[in-house]
Amino acid sequence: MMSYKSENYFKFSYLHSECYHSHLKNWLDVFPKKQLLIIKGEDFFENPKTIFAKVQKFLELPEIELQKYWQAFEIKYTPLRENTRKSLQKYFEPHNFKLYELLNTDFQWN
């Protein structure tokens, strides 16, 4: 377990930045939920055409269809080691539960 703790570590660390509920809670303290469109990145990368149409509808824009949907982050990763995956699942489980409760949506990140 890491004992080094600084404000910058928590502010810029991957683990902290991926705890979406705390970030979204701040936005929901200012804006009603109906004014925010929450989209899973996985859904956008799997089906950009459908998600792009959903965004246009949410923003009340005329629907246009692009000829091509460019992917900015098309990166091939090596598979996680099983012990790393389990450790990350354990870490994120309570944070994801808070997100699911906040949005009343289960993103099924298991």
Image (cartoon, rainbow, N blue to C red):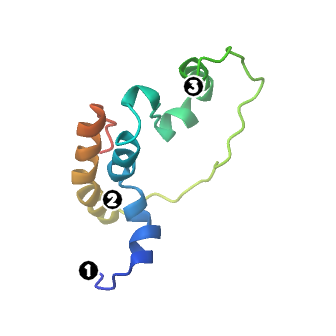
Q: Which residue is mark 2?
A: 85
The C terminus sits in image quarter? top left
Q: Which residue is mark 3?
A: 55
Check the image and name the residue furthest to the right: 67
Q: Residue at x 38, y 45 (%)?
A: 24
Which amino acid type is marked by label 3?
Answer: Val
The tag earlier along the polypeptide, 1 or 2, is 1
Q: Residue at x 33, y 81 (%)?
A: 5
Total numbered badges shown on the rendered structure: 3
Q: Residue at x 23, y 38 (%)?
A: 101
| Horizontal and vertical percent position of residue 51 | 56, 26
Q: Is residue 56 above or below residue 110?
A: above
Q: Is residue 100 above or below residue 86?
A: above
- Please state which of the two labelled residues, at mark 3 or mark 2, is closer to the viewer: 3
Q: Which residue is mark 1?
A: 1
The Cα–Cα distance between marks 3 and 2, rounded to whole angstroms, is: 32 Å
